[in-house]
Image (cartoon, rainbow, N blue to C red):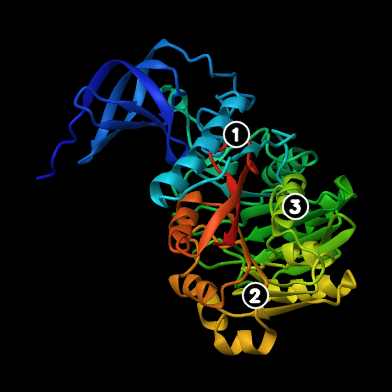
Amino acid sequence: MARKKRINIFENVEVIDAGARGKTVAKAPDGRVIFLTNTVPGDIVDIRTGKKRKAYYEGTAIKFHQKSDKRTEPECEHFEYCGGCKWQNMAYEHQLFYKQKEVTNNLIRIGHLELPEVTPILGCEQQFFYRNKMEFSFSSSRWLTFDEINSEQEIDDRNACGFHISGMWDKILDVKKCHLQEDPSNDIRNFVKEFSIENDLPFFNPRDQNGMMRTLMLRIASTGEIMIVIQFFEEDIEKRELLLDAMMEKFPQITSLQYVINSKANDTLYDQDIILYKGRDHIFEEMEGLKFKIGPKSFYQTNSEQAYELYKITRDFAGLTGDELVYDLYTGTGTIAQFVAKKAKKVIGVEAVPDAIADAKLNAQFNKIENVEFFAGDMKDVFNDTFISTHGKPDVIITDPPRDGMHKNVVAKILEISPNKIVYVSCNSATQARDLALMKHQYKITKTQAVDMFPQTHHVENVVLLEKI
């Protein structure tokens, strides 16, 4: 017999803070923390809790007695349902405050680190339409609103092109206008959806594993070049070519139009052959005179303008004079390595993804940068004594690991070779704090600055400069 979920109602509770993963925080009368998803700090609300853990509740505000002065009206009509921009109801200056607070708290509470005067967070000048890459999913069984479910009308329109509803792998929110990517992103997505409906290109059903239209990826570079990759589940040459030709006629500014036939269970493209239909198989991003070739599988920071600011801070923190050997760990496609190369004697980049390293080498050749070398391999395996004896002991290490942070063996090796400076760029200040705690007996933090790459979300980057004690 299943246990019934116990529901509690707490009345007139003040929301006191913003927490991890975009949730807000209140305190229950019994002292436990309540994590909420639909409030802003300063709201006074009645809360219905669902899950109760040992130390906290998870809840939802069901009545608002007083709305916070930190609130703002969301720009997007889909805000209530779409989980992509969870902080869109909070004024931007307050978003920055809570991002800065989270980074500082993580460094102090998790890492038990001594901080210098913290440089204020760098906000993003463009708070909407800042992403250069978006991925949309098609579904023949779109997510229905509560009003639609409760209505007595039969709903015939079930096709959707948009985003997954949080926690529902098979439900897609149909998006009419997204505020994350500049035009013609919305025009292209809406055209593809309507053309597919009008011409009987069936939408994918993730449960039944059938249909044709599966995903749409849009890249719009800072150079203005546009890449589109459409993922089809089933091949139908006549209908596929009908759609792709119509897209090129409607949007002649498309630089690269590609497609893939993917009939496996998941959507990932990294193990698929992507076929060029029209134009080039790549587009170019540009930063400070450097050009970076971007393919359908390439990684590039999704906020081009703010990536430039992030890289400038990284280069400034490194304080290069032209005589240094620099290691760029987790180099990706080598953007940071090439960005700092003109200030260094030599830069060595290491990355686990072979395709990324191939892109890095091509970009270096294209940019005529001769003082960089790139190597592919798992960091904890490649970054060893033989590698260091072959390429030299670095004066400066720049490291920009994934959200999980650095492997403990990588941290140990860094401490062993003891470079003069370490610049640690992180998209997760919690794992950054964990790694820095392992280094604090040998290094002190002399600079730290958070950078907001993703307005309207809780995500934040942080850059730290470590110097030997």
Q: Which mark is residue 350?
A: 2
Secondary structure of the residue carrying tag 2 is strand
Question: Disc 2 versus disc 1: distance between alpha carbons?
Answer: 32 Å
Type of amino acid at the residue the image marks with label 3: Arg
Q: Answer with mark 2 or mark 3, whichever residue precedes in sequence.
A: 3
Residue 207 lies, in percent from the top left, at 44, 54
Residue 61 seen by the camera: yes
Q: Answer with mark 2 or mark 1, whichever residue precedes in sequence.
A: 2
Residue 210 lies, in percent from the top left, at 52, 58
Type of amino acid at the residue the image marks with label 2: Val
Rendered position, 143 above or below 269: above
Q: Does 199 sit left or right of 10 as displayed?
A: right
Nearer the observer: mark 3 or 1; the answer is: 1
Nearer the observer: mark 2 or 3; the answer is: 2
Quadrant (top left/top right/bottom left/bottom right) for the C terminus? bottom right
Do residues under tags 3 and 1 come within 8 Å of each other at their CB atoms?
no
Residue on which disc 1 sits? 456
Quadrant (top left/top right/bottom left/bottom right) for the N terminus? top left
Residue on which disc 3 sits? 219
Q: Residue at x 21, y 28 (%)?
A: 7
Q: Which mark is residue 240?
A: none
Secondary structure of the residue carrying tag 1 is loop
Q: Residue at x 76, y 53 (%)?
A: 243
Secondary structure of the residue carrying tag 3 is strand
Pointer 2: residues within 10 angstroms few (<14), some, or many (20+)?
many
Residue 82 seen by the camera: no
Quadrant in which residue 13 is drawn: top left
Type of amino acid at the residue the image marks with label 1: Gln
238 and 263: which one is in front? 263
Pointer 1: residues within 10 angstroms few (<14), some, or many (20+)?
many
Quadrant in which residue 42 is drawn: top left
